[in-house]
Image (spheres, helix red, strand yellow):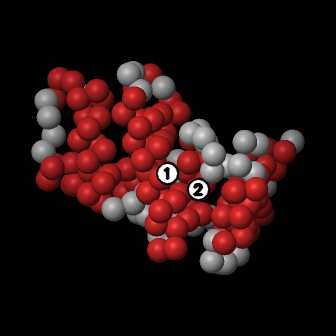
Amino acid sequence: MPIEILNILVSLQQFGGDGQLEHELIALTKLDEQSRGYFELVVKLFIYGNRSDFDQHRSEIWKTICERVKSEKHLARDSESVHLFLDALACPHIENAKRAELLRDVWKSISPSMGAISKCEAEATVAEIQQQYWFVRWDGVDLLNMIEKKELSSVYA
């Protein structure tokens, strides 16, 4: 999926619509079919946000993220999977319990010497992770500010 299309989708979402246009574009670009890459998954989560009419889509995305992260044998060695994992744990559009469950499921692979993590510890860790900006600012993008700083221009140079 070309990054330009993903940038357009994120830009459209910033205009405050109901997400239907973005959803239609996702379907037209076949972004909803077998898109398992970091950018595609995160952009879709970002666009669907916490809108209830996209609950089913968000659940499917979450399932894909969990499958991808859990299936990675060497999570710490695959930066795309680590990015996806951290942004998924920080995503406020997914229930805390689901994020804590994912953390518990992969805990042994990321910290084998520490043993298992309790449900309470996982929930506390997820709450702490959500307070950080990892690679995505889930509360929104200040698109005008980024354009003024010309942060987006390097992508197209």
The residue tagged with tag 1: helix, strand or loop? helix
Q: Amino acid at mark 1?
A: Ile
Q: Quadrant of residue 95?
A: bottom left
Residue lying at 46% horizontally and 66% vertically, measured from the top left: 55
Q: Position of residue 25 (x, y in %)?
A: 74, 60
Q: Is residue 134 left or right of residue 16?
A: left
Q: Nearer the viewer, residue 112 or 98?
A: 98
Residue lying at 63% horizontally and 50% vertically, measured from the top left: 32
- The numbered disc on residue 5 is none
Dot 1 or dot 2: first in sequence order is 2
- Determine if residue 71 is in view: yes
Quarter occupied by the C terminus: top right
Residue lying at 78% horizontally and 49% vertically, measured from the top left: 4
**Mark 1–mark 2 CB contact (< 8 Å):** yes
Judged by depth in the image, the label closer to the viewer, 1 or 2, is 1
Q: Position of residue 136 (x, y in %)?
A: 53, 53
Q: Position of residue 105 (x, y in %)?
A: 26, 38
Q: Position of residue 19 (x, y in %)?
A: 63, 71
Quarter occupied by the N terminus: top right
In the image, residue 71 sits, relative to residue 34, either above or below, namely above
Residue lying at 49% horizontally and 51% vertically, measured from the top left: 61
Q: Which residue is mark 2?
A: 44
Q: Amino acid at mark 2?
A: Lys
Please rate how many residues cluster around mark 1, counting C-alpha atoms within 10 Å: few if below 14, some from 14 to 19, many from 20.
many
Q: Which residue is mark 1?
A: 61
Please rate how many residues cluster around mark 2, counting C-alpha atoms within 10 Å: few if below 14, some from 14 to 19, many from 20.
many
